[in-house]
Image: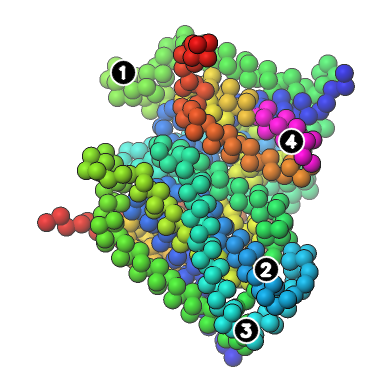
Amino acid sequence: MIYDPIFSDAIIFASLLALLSIGLTLTYITTRVPNFAHASFATIGVYIALIVTHVWGFSPYASIPISFVISGVTAVLLYTFILKPLIRKGASQAIQMIATLAFDLIVIAMLNITADYIVKTFQITSREFSLRSYDVEFMGLPLIVVLAPLTIAILAITLHIILRKTKFGIAMRASTENSDLAGTVGINVKLIYGVSWLMGGGFAGVAGALMSLWFVGDPNLGPQIMPSVFAASIVGGFFSIYGAIAGGILVGLTEVLGTRFLAGEFGAWLIAYRPLIPLIFIVVTLFLAPKGLAGINWSKLRRYVRV
Amino acid sequence: MFESETIFIIDLLAIFAIYAIVNISLNMEFGYTGIPNFGKVLAVGAGAFVAASVPGRIFAEMAGIEGDYILDNLLIVSQINLWLVDNVGVGFAVFFLTLGIAAGVGAGVGILTSYPAIRLRGDYLAITLLAFGESIRIIGNNYTPLVGGTLGVQVPDPLSFLPNELRFPVATIGLVAIAIAVYVYSEKMVRSPLGRMLRAIRDNEVAAEALGKNATHTRIKIIMVSAALAAIGGALYAFYVGGTIAFAYDRASWTFWPFLMILIGGLANNKGVLAGTLIFVVIRKLIIFFKDSFEGFVPFDVVWLDFLLLGVILLVILLYRPQGIFTEKTTNVN
């Protein structure tokens, strides 16, 4: 069997979407505000990978920890200096959402400034670039094809252990479910939320660093992938880490393979409409199961189907 | 005939009028009813797309101009404009017909895109509308019969019978007149029992429903009215600039800036909306005007400083003066 590169596309895209969706869920469960700047945190990772590879001359994989830290810190800045004061002043959820949109705009502007600066200073292509040629081979495949799903698997297991077994994870679950009650038993809720934002933003940064190894990087990548990320989170139910993983994989695979299949059936003009697939996911999920995959009562559904 | 300062002010007034229409409609939704419409660009874009695709084809049919409307667009539209010089009445009739169609299409798009999430919590509606807002560019860029894809199309000018130097002043007067009409309509509406009901639903949905008001139906109604007005704004913009291109209908220009403007001026206060719109349009004009003097001093495109500045301004307003310049007037209950 000849290996079709479309499967690499699908595997990587689905894994990265799951990673972004996990991050979005981690931040959403704390403040209950959808962070519209989340996808641009991934773009930060893309640019860190570009700088690490082209300016410093390291392997793109070296950018993963740096991306985690910088994107994570950016997310913490958004939470600490913008969302926390807004919540303290009693701003509505809509106002908080507008604040994340404004922050997104600032991040996009900074990324564009960085891109212009990189071109002028180092004479490196900083728009529509790809670092695919810097990847190493692993068992006849680019390493990223193996590493992206592996990252999700490791992350899922680690998060499961942290959230279920460690004291920190239990404190985190308590804080997100009832922050007042968690505060009265001595949990530092603000700190927990801060760590949650650090992880959420950090995962987005890692997703961005990995993304640069396969997909084309651009400062305006955030707004382009944002509908997919939100579709994955809505399909997943927005409150569950496992739902986020399932949603990311479902939306990611459908976007890539579904577009390919439909283009094969109806013609190549369909490829340009790929960004409409996440919209279909959002609409169908909101109509059929507004609480997402995680909200469906599977055992009840199984009984219903059998009868 | 006109000094450059006069042209500057005329253009500023026209853009002010168009944004005022869009912002008043957004204020109806967000300020008075509390619907976070992050897909404002959809309705505006729908109106502009109607203006780009409908009147030109009607005129071409009437004037008997042959050819593919998209492929030979430049030629056909210039022939139409010549034909319109002798057919002023028809020109205006089709212009108002286009505004009507735009309003209808806008209302339809508004209801279709908000329907999936209208019964759910506010953030789901916001996400859905935001995601749909991105789709208008994708469709506009790829479905060429609509607005000519990435190349864009010209929009016929019903004012082409006027001499060149009078065209923009007259267009501006027309735009300001329509903006005033929208303002008066909105003021009448928010002072009516319907307006009170909107605020009741925004402030306490449960109480409003307990008193027999159907919150979901009211929201759908307001989204339709507001989307229709925004679509008229979009169509007027397309007529004013004389063309439509899909990539001009992005999130920043027609969703983010309107939110910024109504937040500067003050939510749920139409005077505030006008003040906010004026301040924003003037700042924006000045930024564009002085942009060239920065060029060369900084190692990047100055347009991003603009984004940076406006993003920071919005955050500062949200944090330190969330009620804006004009605060909402409390209703006297006695």
Give the Cα separation between the discs numbered 3 and 1.
79 Å
The label on residue B87 is 3
Q: What is the magenta range?
A: A252-267
Give the Cα separation between the discs numbered 2 and 4.
32 Å
Give the Cα separation between the discs numbered 4 and 1.
55 Å
Give the Cα separation between the discs numbered 2 and 1.
70 Å
Pinpoint the chain carrying mark 1: A
Observer-nearest residue: A166 or B59?
B59
Give percent across and percent down for residue B141. 69, 53
Give the Cα separation between the discs numbered 3 and 4.
47 Å
Q: Is mark 4 in CB contact (under 8 Å) with mark 1?
A: no
Q: Is mark 2 in CB contact (under 8 Å) with mark 4?
A: no
Q: Residue at x 48, y 27 (%)?
A: A289
Is residue B11 within the magenta segment? Answer: no
Look at the picture and state if A64 lies above or below B256. Answer: above
Q: Is mark 3 in CB contact (under 8 Å) with mark 4?
A: no
Decide: few, some or many residues near mark 1? Use Cα within 10 Å; few <14, some 14-19, many ≥20: few
